[in-house]
Image: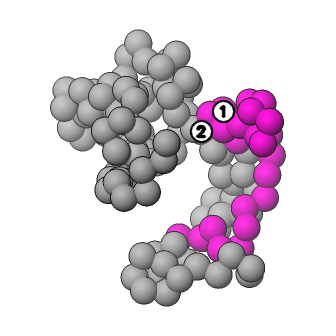
Amino acid sequence: MCDLNRTVLQVIVDEFTNLKSLCGESAIAFFNMSLTDTRKAKEYLLGITHNATNESFPDSTASAHQSGTVLLEKFSANGETPLKRVVVRYGLVDEQGNNLDDVEKTLPDWFRPEKIYQHFNGKLLNFED
């Protein structure tokens, strides 16, 4: 049964690629703990990494991060401006429960950092745009 009254914590970690070098062992412990079933702890982790290489993750976690995370690859034509194009590398499923591996999608217009920022600061998202 879904508990609509529960409080959920969303944690966003930018520079996930460099977390090991910035924080050392505490970053490795943090990442390993984030791969456990966070839904039971009412916590969701969004890690932003610039490369999906094994260097971006702690040693010996390749199978865990592929089974416990979602990897979306974004693109840019000029190295700065993001395109609407995204490839789901792994971690999501379609309506029938089939894995979406290496599936290309187009992000909706509302899925932009400034729109999401505005949403959390009093201006609700318009999903029709």
Q: In which quarter of the image is residue 95?
A: top right
- Where residue 30 sits, quadrant-wise, is top left
**For the view shown, which residue lies furthest in the front direction?**
1
- Quick one: label 1, few (<14), some, or many (20+) residues within 10 Å? some
The magenta stretch spans which residues? 88-113
The residue that label 1 is drawn on is: 90
Dots 1, 2 in contact, CB < 8 A: yes
- Residue behind mark 2: 71
Q: Where is residue 38 in the image (x, y as percent from the top left)?
A: 37, 36
> Going 34% across and 45% down the picture, which residue do you hit?
43
Which of the colour schemes (rainbow, by chain, secondary structure, one colour) is used? one colour
Question: If you read the primary sequence from the N terminus, does the residue marked by circle 1 or circle 2 appear first?
Answer: 2
Image vertical order of residue 75 relative to residue 25, above or below: below
Callout 1 amino acid: Tyr
**Label 1 residue SS:** strand
Residue at screen point 47% across, 20% down: 64
Q: Distance between the residues labelled 1 and 2?
A: 5 Å
**Dot 2: few (<14), some (14–19), or many (≥20) neighbours within 10 Å?**
many
Residue 73 position within the rendered picture, expressed as x and y whole percent measured from the top left: 65, 45
Amino acid bearing label 2: Leu
* Residue 35: in magenta span: no
Looking at the image, which residue is at 63% across and 68% down? Answer: 111
